[in-house]
Structure formats: structure tokens, C-alpha cells
Image: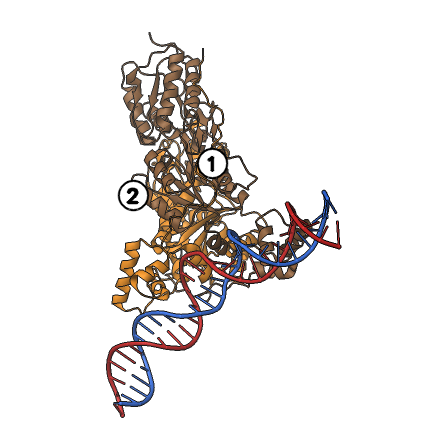
Chain colours: A orange, B brown, C blue, D red
Amino acid sequence: MRRRHPRAGDVGYDGAKPGRQAQVNRPTIKDVARRANVSLKTVSRVINNETSVRDDTRDRVQRAIDELNYAPDQAARNLRSATSHAIGLVYDNPNPYYVISVQNGVLAACHDQGFGLQIHPCDSTVPDLADELRDLVQRTRLAGLVLAPPMSERMELIRYLAANGIRFVRIISAAEDPDDGYPCVYVDDRDAAYDITEHLIQLGHQRIGFLWGGAAHRSSPERFKGYESALKDYDIPLDKKLVIPGDYSFDDGFRGARRLFALRDRPTAIFGSNDEIAAGVLAAAKANGIDVPYELSIAGFEDSPFSKQSWPALTTAKQATEDIARHAALRLIAELKPSGSGVAPVNRGFSPQLVIRDSTARAHKPAT
Amino acid sequence: MRRRHPRAGDVGYDGAKPGRQAQVNRPTIKDVARRANVSLKTVSRVINNETSVRDDTRDRVQRAIDELNYAPDQAARNLRSATSHAIGLVYDNPNPYYVISVQNGVLAACHDQGFGLQIHPCDSTVPDLADELRDLVQRTRLAGLVLAPPMSERMELIRYLAANGIRFVRIISAAEDPDDGYPCVYVDDRDAAYDITEHLIQLGHQRIGFLWGGAAHRSSPERFKGYESALKDYDIPLDKKLVIPGDYSFDDGFRGARRLFALRDRPTAIFGSNDEIAAGVLAAAKANGIDVPYELSIAGFEDSPFSKQSWPALTTAKQATEDIARHAALRLIAELKPSGSGVAPVNRGFSPQLVIRDSTARAHKPAT
DNA sequence: GACACGTCTGACAACGTTGTCAATGTGCAC
DNA sequence: GTGCACATTGACAACGTTGTCAGACGTGTC
């Protein structure tokens, strides 16, 4: 019965001519100089926004640049100035939403400042990561690196990079400026976790489960500290049976939730260390026929798009990941070019904001 | 009651010295030449794997390279050879899972072939996209571009790039090699959509709703054609009321599903053009108290991670996105360096595979 | 009018590599 | 031994830009 549409086999192709790229005689600094009737160097000065060029000269050169639609050749520039106008972004994160946000933030900053970006996903567990990064920087003459967690939190790596004269900015989880001498942009996970826990407490929950994220990420203990600290402030004893170790994954959320459900005195709310964990909890609740939020409140962390799309939509904490990444890159670039008019090269903190949706609700009167 | 942990203010930082990067006297081709007691050019030949270097000479040079831990300077290389060993990846896709997969696939190929990668997310709706891409290629001397949908499907753009001597490979949706003279790697969406529809039919479904994806993507009509073609092969009349236009989004899935639910003769299965749409359908079903899969079967497309994580897990079609992207990049690079021992520069097709999960089940006997 | 000083500009070399082309060595046929 | 083809190697220039340093010019002072 079934008739597939026809399928062509692989077909040899030999379209455009091989060999060198047809560079359509792109104008060089030389052409601009000739047209503006100045020397090469003066054009160079205008391009690089150096001082000490008379206004009328600058205008003349600029006009020539515009007319010729000239753009400096990056390769030549990189070679001569011994540093590319490009930075690297180093990450090892399984969450595509996070990675894309970081990329876009950094890219925005790069675009803004006329820098290029080299992405470098990597495996944070390989032993010679430090060398890998040094080679990367030196081979491509990267001007600096933006380090995302967990690389940004490995001090031996940080020290190695610094010792090798490599500039970088870390995106890290911390309650305050670490002030360890290395530049960073920090996310106050603890604070936000406090807010989420407090929200659950204020809904009347007393038994609140906590599912840890990955041990490799500093954000995980930070979030736990926020949870712990809120319980303490509201005089709720911490029940260790309600705290389950695990990873930042759906599966660990699912498994962790099942362990909590099996408890004699089951929690009325569960705080998953990120949205994926919370999604796992949600799935486990459904599998066990537990109604959310009526019988169980669930909160996540991160405000991933699917936290909006689950059913019910997840209460979570919204990280301005793109902003954070953008700021990190700007901070790096600001340090790179002291002349730059950009951001001051100063550490800065960001606090995720509580987002209340439908997965959390008032607690039932406990059975007691 | 509430006591937040202390928060430090922004703190000025002035760590490493500003100015030029501390280049620790990286070895150059000159050092290698001196050590191996050969000329610069010979070293260059070894590096570039050119023929006509005697084996013992090659060994000597290679040893020197290893001993000095020499790596060629990209900037100089790019400048001299008038083409960087780097390609660009151009995409405009809201789905991070897709983008990351494509990035990783292309990166793998680049790494393999000693190429760099410049990512270039863009807005496919801006009018001067063509110029933007040309400038990108020329300014950074990109050797070529990998174009993801929907850019890869806009023929006026394709023709412009080709006319400007820019090399590229398209990742496109097509039932067969388009054979339009421009290189591509194609994904047979139609075939896979046929499989999904057939799967539903074989479960006994006769009234199958179809939710379109974005009009800007060619994959959307392709998937529809697969749906249409399967219905035809099984002699099921196409009911236009069951076909709903929309975008590749959760919201359109939700809305589309509600329109279908409102029908007098409600479908017993819905095929969403991608997993996000299907997730929207799932949410709508839950909101309307419709049991999935007992009362309604739902199928998606793409095998996004959350298709596994929804409840019930979605039946879908798995695209080997990373492989496809890797192959696209290899195909591009193969064309770039005729000397390369890599893949033959030949168009190639990939078919997504049906993945059956829990959101589809045998249809109930219709009320008729 | 000479001088010093600051502002602005240009000549030239250099960055590290590869393309061009010529020079040298090697093996073989005569 | 000579000549020739071919394999192998090297000298040199060039890619497009910026750093260095010196020169030209203008302005104010004595």
C-alpha cells in the first residue's frame, strides 16, 4: 500500500570554481589614504579612534572610508597588534537555554564593542583543560575569556590562567563580591533561593523538600544555603530526610521526588534546584497521581522557557542570564581597552527574581 | 524576621596589569626552521601537509615542532593566505536545543579539520541580510558559511551569496537532492511526517488533526505533505477543518488544539509539526480534562529533550541534527580544500526516525 | 626674528606566515 | 660521463595593518 515519494541518490556536485575565494578587490587602508590624501598611519589613527587627529582631517578620512565602504581587515590587524579583537566564551553546561542566553549576551556586548567571539564548549572534567584554554588563547590570539560555571569556579584553573597572563572574567554564583582578586560577575543564588523558600513558607508549608543540583556547580550549595537560611529565619527545623542529593537533571528530580513521596511524613512542597529538576518532580507527582498544586507545591529555579510550558506552570526564580553574560563581556572588554568609553571594570552582582506561577499554592492543614 | 546575608557593594578591581597580553615568546615558524635546520618554507610545507617533502626532512621538522610545542599563528596565516581557516554558522532559530545541536555538530567538524568557527545568529527578516553576511565573510575572511533554515531556503539570498563568490552549504528540508546547483545537506521531513501519520493510522485513528509550523520554514509544508500523502495512501479523506495554520510555538499548539477540541467531530489524534506545538496541545488537553493518550493521541516532531520529559512522553521523529550539521560543515570544508582527505563534496540526505513513546495509543472505536 | 613647545602627520619597519620562482640534488637513460 | 626530468629545498616578497620615531607645522614667548 505504502508508496514513498521518489528519493534521489547522492549526486555529485561541482558548482562554483574551486580554489581561492573571489575577493572582489576589497579596499584597503591604502586606498582610503590615497583618496583622503593622507598617509596610511593617519587612516589607521582615525580607524582606531586615536586622539591627535585634526577634525577636518578626521572628517576627510571618514568620508573616504564611507565612500569606499572600507572595513579594516581583521587578520592583518590581529597580526600586527599581536592581539585579536576577539574574546572566547568557555562553557560546559548541558542546558541549551542557558548556553544560548549566555552566548547571546556575550555576542551583544562583542557586537557593541566591535569584538569577535570564539565559542568554546568544553569538558570541564578533562585533566589538561588549563593547557587547552591557554593554547586556545594563544593560537587564536584571543584578547580574553568569559568563563561560565563550572570552569569559573575552579580556582586552580583561574590561578593558572592568571599566572599565564590570560585575561578573563568569571560568571559565578556567590552571595557577594568574592574579592579574591580575580574579576567576576556574580549571581546571588542564595538570595533567590531564600525568596523561593520564603514564598513556600508564607503559603503555609512547613515540610519543604529540597533537591540538590550538581555538586560540580557552586550554585548548588548556594541555593541550599538560601533554603536553609529561610527555614532558620522562620524557625522551621531542617529535616535532613527532606534534603536529597542529585544532579541538575530531570531524572534526578524524578527519582528524588519518589524518595520524598515514600516518606512516612511526606512534604507538602518541594523546591527543586532548577527547573529541570522541578519538571522531574512534576512528572513523578503525575505518575503517582499526586495533584499539583493542591496536594503538592513545586518550585524550580532559572525560569527556563519550559517552566512556563509545563502544566501547571512552574513557580521559579528568573535569572537575567543574558544581561549577566553581557555585563561580563563588557567588563572584560573594558579592562582590555583602557581607552574604551564602556563600562567601568568593576565586579557586579545580579539577583534572580521570584516568579510565582501555578505550581505553588496554599498548603493544606497538615494531617497532624 | 527576615535577615538576609550580608551583601557587599560593588568593589573596584584592578588586578592584572593593563595593556598588551603577556605573550610568553611563542615559538614561530622561524624557531622551528632553525631547530630543524631547514628553511621557513619547508616548515610551512610540513605544517600544511604538502607533498614533496622528503620523509626524513618531514620527520625532523615534525620533531622540532613537537619539541617546541609550536602551533601556527592563525592571524598571520589568515593574512597571508587571504582566507581564514574558519567558517561561519548562520542561524535564526528560536529553539536552543536545535541551535546547540547544530553548533556542536559544526564545531566537531571544524575541530576535526583544524578550522575555526564564527557563530552568527541573525534576524532573517531584516532587509539587508545579504549584505550583512557578505560583510561578515569579507571582514573576517571567512572561508565559507553553513546556512541553517530559514536562511538556507531563501533563494534570492543564496543566489546573491553565490554571485559574490561566497562558498556555503545549506541545511534544508527536502524530499530529495534539490539539484539546483547549490550545495546542501537535506533533511527528509516529508518522509518522517509520513511515518508519524502512518503510525497514527495504524493505531486506528481516522480523524487526525494537523498543526502547521512556521510559514517561514520549508520544513512546515514538507511535513504537511508527508501527512497528506500518508492519508491518501490509506484512503482517508483530508478534512480541511482538521488542518490548522500556526507557528512552531507552544502557544500556537495550545490555541490550535483548542480550535480542534471545539469541533463537533473532534479528532482522536493530533500531529503537531514540532515538539513545542505538541507540548502546547498536551497542555491544552490537560486544561480541557482530556486524557492523553486514552482520549487523544498526540505526536510531535524533532525529539527535543522535553519530548521525553513531558507527561506522557511524546511520540515524535528524531532528527540527527548534530550529524546533519557535522556533515554540512565537512561538506563545506571538503569543497574548500580540494587537497583535503575528508568527505567527498556531495549532497546528502538524512531521514528522521520515528520514536514511539506514550502519547500515542490505539484509537477508541469512534462514536459513529 | 629666533626659539621652544605642542600638535599633528608621515616614512618605514615589523608582525608570522605562504606564494612564486629559482636553485640544488638525485636517479636514470644514453 | 653527460644530459635530462623530476623531486626536494630555499630566498625573497607579499599580505594589510599598527608601532616607532622623526619631521612639519603652528603658536606663543622672549
Q: Nearer the viewer, residue B298 or A365?
A: B298
Q: Chain of mark 1?
A: B
Q: Secondary structure at mark 1?
A: helix
Q: Is residue A218 left or right of residue B236?
A: right
- Sequence-earlier tag: 2 or 1: 2
Q: Eyeballing the image, is C20 above or below B161?
A: below
Q: Amino acid at mark 1?
A: Ala
Name the residue beneath numbered marker 2: B128
In percent of width and height, residue B113 lies at: 53, 43
Distance between the alpha carbons at the discs numbered 2 and 1? 25 Å
Q: Nearer the viewer, residue C28 or A141?
A: C28
Residue B290 image point, x, y percent: 35, 21
* Disc 2 residue type (three-letter): Asp
Q: Nearer the viewer, residue A233 or A281?
A: A281
Q: What is the secondary structure assignment of the residue under circle 2?
A: loop
Q: In the rendered image, which residue does mark 1 sit on?
A: B328
Residue B165 vertical position relative to residue B47 in the rendered view, above or below: above
Same chain, marks 2 and 1? Answer: yes
Position of the C terminus of chain B by quadrant: top left
